[in-house]
Image: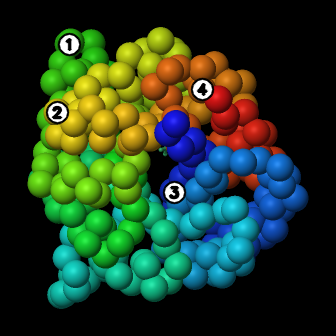
Amino acid sequence: MRKIYCIANWKMYKTAREATDYIEHLLPLIEDFKENIYLSVPYTSIAAASSFAKKTKIVIGAQNMNDAKEGAFTGEIAGLMLKEAGAYFVIIGHSERRSLFGETDEFIHKKVIRALQDDIQPILCVGETLEERNSGTMKKVLQRQISIALSNVPKSSSDKLILAYEPVWSIGTGKTATPKIIDEAHAFCREVISELFGKKGANGISIVYGGSVKVENVSEIMKGENVDGVLVGGASLDVREFAKIVHKCKK
Ligand code: PEP
């Protein structure tokens, strides 16, 4: 049985105080929920959020990191800094990082390796643009993104990875991929992962879906055999909304 994850990505929203207020409100709403709840918060909220969420079922992580251990990289942040601040995981290769900040597959690969070295769980995001889907190159794109990002990742580390399939055309647009499209893409991602880690390794890796997930569509999405959770952007900003999604994020 693969682990199920309900992951919030707050993007560049919420100060440290807003983060702890949110967690305070979220905790009583998710008391009886058994799966993994991850909040990806801005850097400046990590320390406050992780100390507030200590000894609760909420796990705090970051939305990005640099590939270097340390160095003269003004404005960047290292994995070890995130870890010390209380981050357990980090999102790597989000489409906003790829498209707005020019992150390449090779750079993303280096970040995955660094995160594993620094003992931070990487959530690797992959996904095709609308153009790529319409031109029939979706599989080629996913294959390239996954195989470059995960090359040289030791098989023994495969259980630490989470993969997020996030079609770019669906992120922040309100256009959710259909449950069929999602499940097929996840099955394909698993095939690619099995070329790297073998069938057994691939079967253990959770693949979550992200792209305009909301209360209304999460149950349908979760029905997919290969769907092991969701990554929620916009709809995670409202604590009540997110709590409702959390409750539907189950098998
Ligand atoms: C995201 O930021 O990863 C995301 C899926 O955003 P949204 O849910 O707003 O589409």
| Among the 4 quarters of the image, the one containing residue 186 | top left
> Looking at the picture, does residue 98 appear above or below residue 76?
above
Q: Residues within 10 Å of mark 3 (few under 14, many from 20)?
A: some
C-alpha distance separating marks 4 and 2: 25 Å
> Looking at the picture, does residue 26 appear above or below residue 166?
below
Residue 15: horizontal and vertical position, in percent?
Answer: 63, 73
Question: Mark 2: which amino acid?
Answer: Glu
Q: Are marks 3 and 2 in contact (CB under 8 Å)?
A: no
Q: Earlier in the sequence, mark 4 or mark 3?
A: 3
Q: Residues within 10 Å of mark 2 (few under 14, many from 20)?
A: few
Asked if one can make out residue 118 in the rendered structure from this viewpoint, the answer is yes
Could you tell whether 69 is left or right of 184 in the image?
A: left
Q: Residue 11 bears which disc, if any?
A: 3
**Which mark's residue is nearer the viewer, 3 or 2?**
2
C-alpha distance separating marks 3 and 1: 30 Å
Q: Are marks 2 and 1 in contact (CB under 8 Å)?
A: no
> Looking at the picture, does residue 45 appear above or below residue 130?
below
Query: What secondary structure is found at the residue carrying circle 1?
Result: loop
